[in-house]
Image (cartoon, grey):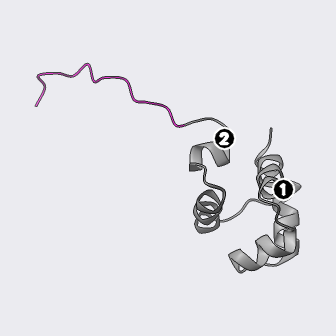
Amino acid sequence: MTLGERLARLRNQKGLSQDALAEALGVSRQSVSKWETDASIPELDKLVRLSGLFGVSLDELVSGSSPAVPAPSSNIGIV
């Protein structure tokens, strides 16, 4: 699933129109449409706001995966 497809799915799950989402983010409806069709990518500040609005991590929003839990460090004892 592409970023645009995830944005459209999350927006629809929240019951928001493209106009409503655009207004919440301070962008045009055309910008939201371009994001959802993968014609363009939101700027980082918009991605951060989108992740908060939709209640997902940036990893989930951008790549579709949950954040990875880092493996324990094997550098124990190294200062």
Left-right relation of 41 to 12: left
Asked where in the image residue 36 lies, by quadrant, the reply is: bottom right
Inter-mark Cα distance, 2 to 1: 19 Å
Q: State yes or no: residue 75 in magenta.
A: yes
Q: Tell me where the magenta segment starts and ends, as one range.
A: 67-79
Q: Position of residue 59 (x, y in %)?
A: 58, 44
- Magenta segment's dominant SS is loop
Q: Residue at x 10, y 31 (%)?
A: 79
The residue nearer to you, when weighing 37 against 53, is 53
Which structural element holds mark 2?
helix
Which of marks 1 and 2 precedes in the sequence? 1
Which of label 2 and label 1 is nearer to you? 1
- The type of residue carrying mark 1 is Asn
Q: State yes or no: residue 32 in magenta.
A: no
Left-right relation of 73 to 14: left
Q: Residue at x 58, y 50 (%)?
A: 58
Q: Position of residue 33 (x, y in %)?
A: 88, 65
Image quadrant containing the N terminus: top right
- Relative to 76, say whether 15 is above or below: below
Count residues near mark 1 (Cα–Cα under 10 Å), then give few for <14, some for 14-19, many for 20+. Answer: few
- Relative to 30, say whether 59 is above or below: above
Where does label 1 land, which residue? 12
Q: Position of residue 60 (x, y in %)?
A: 63, 43
The residue nearer to you, when weighing 65 against 9, is 9
Where does label 2 land, which residue? 63
Q: Residue at x 65, y 65 (%)?
A: 43
- The type of residue carrying mark 2 is Ser
